[in-house]
Amino acid sequence: MRRNFWPVWLWLAGLLLCATLTARAHYRTDMGDFLPRTHSLGLAALEAQVSGGGAAKLLLVAIDHAPTPALEALNKSLASRLRQSPDFEAVLNGDDRSLTEIQNFVWQNRYLLSSGTTPQAFSVAGLHTALENGLALLGSELGGIAAQTLPADPTGAALGLAQSLGGAGANGPKSENGVWVSPNGQATLLLLRTKAPGFDLEAQQRAQTFLMQNFTTARAAIPGAANARLRMTGPGVFAVQTRNVTKRDVTRLSLLASAGAVLFLLLAYRSPLALALGLLPVISGALAGIAAVSLVFGFVHAITLGFGITLIGEALDYSVYLLTHTQHEAGARAAVARIWPILRLGALTSIAGFAAMLGSSFTGFAQLGLFSIAGLITAALVTRFVLPPLVPDGFFAPGARAIGTPLRWIRRHQGLARMSLGGVAVLALLSLALHRGGLWQTNLLSLSPLPPATQALDKTLRAELGITNPRFFLAWRAGNEQEALTISETLTPILSGRAAKGEIGGFSLPSQILPSNAAQQVRRAALPNDTILRTRFAAALSGLPYQADAFAPFFQAVAAARKAPLLTIASLPPALALRLHAMLSQTKTGWIVLAPLGRVNNAAALQAALPAGVKLVDLNRQSSLLLRLFQHEAAALALYGGGAILLILALFLRSWRQVARVVLPLLAAVTVCAAALTMGGGKLSIFMVAGFLLIIAVGSNYCLFFARRGLDEAALERALASIMLANLCTVAAYGLLSLSAIPVLHDIGETVALGTFLCLLFGAAFAVPARQTGP
Amino acid sequence: MPRRLAAICALVWLCAQTPAGFTLPGLMSALGQVRAASASFTETKTLPLLTTPLQSSGTLDYVAPDYVRKTTTAPAPQNFLLQNGMVTLTLNGQTQRFTLAQAPQLAGLVEGVRATLAGDLPALQRYYDLSLSGRADHWQLLLRPRDPALAKMLAWMSITGTGDKITEIDSADTKGGETRMQVRETILHAP
C-alpha cells in the first residue's frame, strides 16, 4: 500500500501557523476578564473591586523575622530607597513625615476642605457658639491641643476634618518609632503605590523586583537583620504571581502528569516512536485551541490556558485507541478505518458538550468552549489523517493485552459487578439528596487562581494596614472627576445623619478628601472680609472669658483662604491621594466611585434615602449573585450540552437501547463522583462542574467502545485494553494535577481522575454486551 | 510657672534622701496592686488664652490596667473614657472615638496618668523621665517628657499621693497653661 503523505505536510503547515499565533497571543490574568460583561452597577462595582479597581496599583508589604529595632531600621532604609525611585508614586510607612504632611495639608486648607465653612458659621451668632464650644473643649482632655489651635481656628474647622477623615477604612496601623507595626508587633509594614498601572505585568514585575533588590541591599547593611523576610501582596503582586505560578504549575505539573501517562504508554507500546506519535494529537490540539481563542477574542485568559489544556486531555485517548487497535499484520490504516466511526462519534459528542459553553456570558467559559472545540477537531483530524501514514509497518502494542486484564475480569463477573456498582450508585444518590448546607461553593475567591495561603496573607496584610475590604459600598457612575465629587457631596448630609444615629458605622467619601471645585468656591465666598470678620468676632466674644487680642492668627488664616487657589488631586499629599484613588476606578465609559461604609443596620432603608443613581452595594450579596448566575449558567450548559450529546448519540446509534447503554453508566459515574466530592460537607466548585463535562466527554468514548456489538472476542479484548490504557493515562495525569496548589488545576484533576475511573467501572459493568454463555 | 517648677525641683533635691525601702519600683508595685478605684475630683485650669480660670468637677473611675473614665458634671456634662487604647470623648453633645495611636500627643498625656495608676513603669518611662520624692505616706512623682512630640506640648506633670492613693495631679503646658486636679478617692479595691 502506498503511503499518502500530503495530510502530514498540510498538518505541518497548520502547526507552524498555530505556533506563530500562539507566540504572539496576548495572555491576561485579570479575574475581571473572566467575569461576564455586564452593565449592572452592582456587578460593575464587584468587578472593579475584584480587579483591584482603583487600588490596582497598591503593594502591601510586611517585613518580619528579625528583632524589632532591626525591622524598624530596615523598614526606614527601604522606604527612603523607594522614595527616590520613579517607579513608586507613594511610599507610606507610618513615618512622622507622611502624618505631618496630612496634618499640614488639612491645617493649611481647612476652610476650603471643611463643609462647616458657611455664611452662618461666620455670623456673630455662629462665631459665638463656636467660641462657647471652644471653652468646653479647653476644659477637656483635648484642652492642651485646643489651646494651641484655638487662636488660629476658633471655629474648629481642622478638628472636624480630622474626625471626618477618620471614616471607614481610614484607620491606619499603629505607628512605633515612626514605622507602622502589625498588631502583634512581629512585623513592620509599608504601603506602596506603583506608577505603572496594575495590568502592566512587565512594569509590575519590574517594580517588585526593584523592591526585593533594595530590600536585600538594605538588609545586608543592617546588623541583626540577616534573617529578615519581606512578604508582599496586592493586585499587581497577584497578577505577576498568578502568571508565574500558572506557568510553573502548568509546565512542571503538566510535565509530571505527562510523565505518568507516558509510563503506561511505554508499557503498552514498548516503542518510543509510537509514544511520540501518540502525543501529536494533543499538542496539535492545544496549539490550535490557543490560536483560535486568540484570533476570536483578541486575548487568551490564563485560566483558559491552564484549564483548556486539561480539557482536551481527551485527545490523548484518540491516539491510544488507534495505536492499541493497530494489529501486527493489518497496520494503522486498517485500524483507523475500523475505529474512526466511534472516534468521530466520541469527538462529536464532546464537541456538542463543549459547544454549549460558547454562548456563556462568562468570557472565560466562552473561551474554554472555543478552545476545546478547536482542539478536539484538530486532534481527531490528526489522529485520522496524520498518524496512520506515520506509524511504522508491523507496529502493534505488545503490552496492551496485559493492561486490559482487570476489565476482562469485570466482564467475566458482570453480575456481581452490576450488583455492587448499582448499590454504590443508589448510595451516592442518597448521599446527594441528604447533603446539607448547599452543594455549591459560594465564595467568589474559590474562582481565583491564587493558592489559599496567598489569599490568607493578603487578608491579613489588608487588615493590618487598615485597608480591609469593606462589605458595603456606595457606588455611582460619573462622567468625570468633578461629577464624581459633586455627587459625593450630596451624600455627606445623608450619611452623617445616619452615622450620628448609629444606623451606619463610619464612612469615607471622596469629597471628604477633595471637595468639588463648586463646593470650594462656595466656601471661599462664605468667608467675610477682614473688616467684617473682626467686627463680628469682637461682638461674638462678648460675655466669654477669652483674651480679645489672642485671635490674630485666625484673621490671617481667613484672609489667606479667601485668596487661596482651588485644590486639585495634584495638591493632595501622597497618603491622601492614595485614599482618593482607591475610591475612584476609571472604566472605559467613565468613572465608577466606590465609597466604603463601615456597617449598615438596615440596607433597604439606606438605599431608599439615597439619590437616584447611587446604589448601596453589598459585595457579599453581589458575589453570591454572580456565583448564582454562574451556577445557573453551569446548569444550563450541562442541560444543553447533555441534550446535544443525547441527540447526536440518538442520530448515530439509531437505537434508544444503545443510547441508554452509553448514557446511563455515565450518569451513574457522575453521580457517584459528585457524592464522593461532597462527602463530609464538601462543596462543588465551578471547576468541578466543568470537570463533569470532561468526564462525560471522555467517558462517552469509553462507553461507545464498550457498547459496540458484533465484535469477535479478540476485537473486544483489544477494545477493552485500549480503554483501560486510555483510562490509566487519564487517572495518572489528572491525579497528578490534583497536587497543584492552583484551585483550577487541583479541582479539575481530582474530579476527572475519579470520574473517568468510575466511568470505566460502570461502562465495563453495564455498557459491555453480556458474554455469550457457551453451550 | 518657672518659679513653681523651681520649687518642685528644689523639693526633689531636698527629698533626694528618700528613706530606705521607698523606691520607684516599690511605689509602682504598690500602685499596680490596685484593681479598681473611684474618686471625685475638682479641677482648675489656668490658660493664657482666658481671662479667668476654668473650674470643673466630677468623678473618676479606674479599673486595672487600662480603663480610665472621667465624668465631668459641672459646669457642663463631659465624658472621657479610655478603654483598651481607645478614647471616647463626649462634649458639646458630640461623641468622638479615636485610638491613642491616632493621637500621639494625647497618648503621652493620657499614658502618664494611666500608667501611674496601673504601676506600669516601662510604659511611663517610654514617655517620661521620672523622679520620685517624699515618703510612702506622702510622695510626689515628677514626670518630664522625653518624647519630643509630647515635650512640644507638655512641660511637666506631677502626681502626688499617699500610699497607693493618688491625691493630686498637676501639669503645665509649654504655652503657660496650668492644670491642678485634686482627687479624693471614695472607693478603692486593693488586695
Image: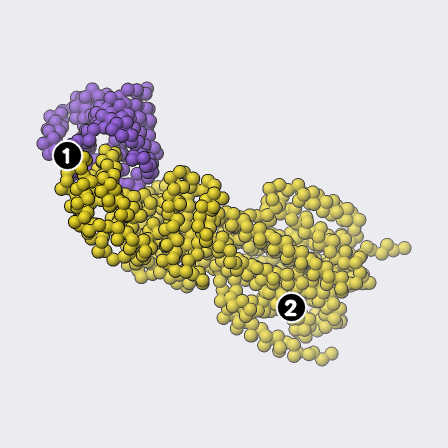
Residue A377 tag number: 2
Circle 1: element type: loop
- Residue B16's spot in the image, x, y percent? 13, 26
- Residue A631: mark: none
Tell which chain the image draws in yellow: A
Q: Nearer the viewer, residue A131 or A457?
A: A131
Q: Residues within 10 Å of mark 2 (few under 14, many from 20)?
A: many
State whether discs 1 and 2 lie on one chain. Answer: no
Name the residue: 75% across, 68% down.
A338
Label 1 – label 2 distance at C-alpha: 94 Å
Amino acid type at mark 1: Thr
Q: Is residue A249 visible?
A: no
- Chain letter, colour purple: B
Q: Residues within 10 Å of mark 1 (few under 14, many from 20)?
A: few
Marks 1,2: beta carbons within 8 A: no
Percent across and percent down for residue A663 are 73, 56
Q: Residue, x 32% and y 20% (percent of image)?
A: B189
Q: Residue at x 28, y 23 (%)?
A: B39
Q: Nearer the viewer, mark 1 or mark 2?
A: 1
Work out which quarter of the rendered image holds the N terminus of chain A and state it.
Answer: bottom right
> As shown in the figure, which amino acid type bears the numbered disc 2?
Ile
Secondary-structure class at tag 2: helix
Q: Chain of mark 2?
A: A
Q: Where is mark 1, residue-wise?
A: B51
